[in-house]
Image (cartoon, helix red, strand yellow):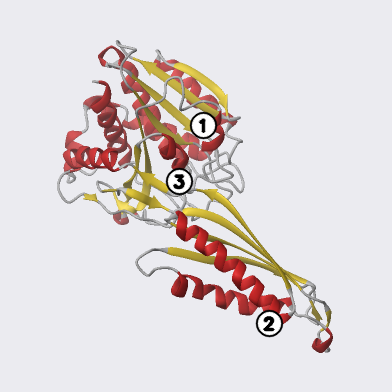
């Protein structure tokens, strides 16, 4: 650990003693990653650990591979607090060299830190179980599949993880390699964006590349559209708001001397406000109609809404900020966090007041600085004890 960070001084002995176990768990999950709704082995290890802790009412197979565990303290009539971690990995080929826990599953890797989230919450589970008699109320631990897609939160909620009883608050953390260990970032209100998938299908009339006058060229039309799309954010969205519109994939044509019949563009649009999300959709339709008038194409725009904005409850965020400052010290808590990434923690936060925050797990001195979803992604495991301590302190504000 880094003894220069004041936050480590406030970590209780029980958590310090579990540091090695959390690292061992994380490396085991990292070595055996499983993508969304395929987290069979991961879920089995989670359930086995929880059984070993004692005292938990455990449900497995929730939303296919999810695990939910309730721990009820000395007074069942007290409040219930929920903590959530995600378990799935990404379909990325790992390129970390020199680590003995690199992925053994070809083409799948924990490149976003979900292995750490699961390990941290298992550490929290052990401490809570050891102190069950001190709890007035209860804690619900939610180990969720498929955060990276197609989304595990909604089916978990449909299967009752926020009912019987309904939690009074929910918290979740995300390790962040672009933030140094010992720092934390959070914000009130929307902190992560609505994430929508785009598919734009442009139909033309194919033909010989030497006789373009006999064709309707969808590649030329698509080229114009890609450029025009950039004006949507710069000229239709309020400059004080934020939005992103990106095309990440183009499919069209088969040989160099033939004009294609069709081009398909795929991408994403991101926004923080529902009215901005609706505006982006309208402008895409407008541009599609304009394209057809100009080039004679037939354009079909499909927008698939994936995750809503992740909106932190102001009161719960102020609580989390206060707890973090007590642990980490002045200057180590960044407020006003906003990212254009998406997170299906958003579905829980629409139902229950709570806070989702980012805890630093980067360390340039150790060479740990690759961004998330990168094949060279890794974490400074010193961050685990801080994450566990923060979650425990938040729970204690409700049930002690």
Identify residue for label 3.
99
Secondary element type, mark 2 = helix
- Residue 189, can we see it? yes
Secondary element type, mark 3 = loop
- Describe residue 164's horizontal placement relative to residue 17 as left or right: right
| First reached walking from the N terminus: tag 1 or tag 3 | 3
Looking at the picture, how far across and down is residue 271, in whole percent?
45, 58
Graded by Cα atoms within 10 Å as few (under 14), some (14 to 19) or many (20 or more), the crowding at tag 1 reads some
Choose top left, top right, bottom left or bottom right for residue 19.
top left
Residue mark closest to the camera, 1 vs 2:
2
| First reached walking from the N terminus: tag 1 or tag 2 | 1
Q: Residue at x 38, y 35 (%)?
A: 23
Looking at the picture, how far across and down is residue 298, in whole percent?
74, 71
Comparing 254 with 246, the one in front is 246
Graded by Cα atoms within 10 Å as few (under 14), some (14 to 19) or many (20 or more), the crowding at tag 2 reads few
- Describe residue 37's horizontal placement relative to residue 160 as left or right: right
Identify residue for label 1.
157
Looking at the picture, how far across and down is residue 68, in whole percent?
48, 24
- Describe residue 150's horizontal placement relative to residue 292 as left or right: left
Identify residue for label 2.
294
| First reached walking from the N terminus: tag 3 or tag 2 | 3
Up-down: is 379 above or below 285? above
């Amino acid at each position: 650990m880094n003894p220069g960070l004041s936050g480590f001084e406030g970590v209780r002995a029980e958590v310090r003693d579990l540091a090695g176990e959390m690292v061992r768990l994380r490396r085991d999950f990292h070595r055996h990653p499983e993508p969304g709704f395929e987290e069979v082995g991961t879920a089995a290890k989670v359930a086995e650990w929880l059984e070993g802790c004692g005292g938990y009412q455990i449900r497995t197979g929730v939303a296919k591979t999810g695990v939910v565990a309730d721990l009820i303290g000395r007074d069942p009539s007290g409040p219930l607090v929920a903590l959530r971690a995600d378990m799935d990995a990404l379909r990325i080929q790992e390129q970390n060299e020199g680590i003995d826990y690199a992925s053994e599953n070809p083409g799948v890797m924990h490149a976003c830190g979900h292995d750490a989230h699961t390990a941290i919450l298992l550490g929290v589970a052990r401490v809570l179980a050891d102190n069950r008699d001190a709890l007035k109320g209860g804690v619900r631990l939610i180990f969720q599949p498929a955060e990276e897609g197609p989304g595990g939160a909604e089916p978990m909620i449909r299967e009752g993880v926020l009912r019987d009883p309904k939690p009074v608050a929910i918290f979740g953390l995300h390790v962040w390699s672009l933030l140094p260990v010992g720092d934390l970032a959070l914000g009130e209100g929307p902190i992560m964006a609505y994430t929508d998938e785009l598919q734009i299908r442009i139909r033309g009339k194919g033909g010989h590349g030497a006789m373009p006058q006999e064709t309707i060229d969808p590649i030329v039309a698509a080229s114009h559209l890609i450029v025009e799309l950039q004006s949507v954010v710069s000229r239709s969205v309020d400059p004080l708001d934020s939005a992103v519109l990106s095309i990440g994939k183009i499919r069209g044509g088969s040989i160099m001397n033939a004009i294609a019949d069709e081009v398909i563009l795929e991408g994403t649009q991101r926004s923080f406000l529902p009215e901005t999300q609706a505006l982006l959709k309208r402008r895409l339709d407008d541009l599609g109609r304009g394209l057809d008038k100009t080039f004679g194409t037939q354009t079909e725009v499909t927008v698939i809404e994936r995750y809503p904005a992740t909106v932190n409850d102001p009161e719960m965020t102020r609580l989390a900020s206060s707890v973090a400052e007590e642990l980490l010290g002045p200057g180590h808590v960044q407020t006003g966090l906003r990212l254009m990434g998406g997170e299906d923690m958003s579905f829980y936060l629409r139902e229950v007041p709570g806070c989702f925050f980012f805890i630093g797990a980067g360390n340039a001195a150790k060479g740990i600085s690759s961004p998330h979803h990168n094949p060279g992604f890794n974490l400074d495991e010193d961050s685990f004890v801080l994450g566990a301590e923060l979650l425990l302190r938040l729970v204690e504000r409700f049930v002690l």
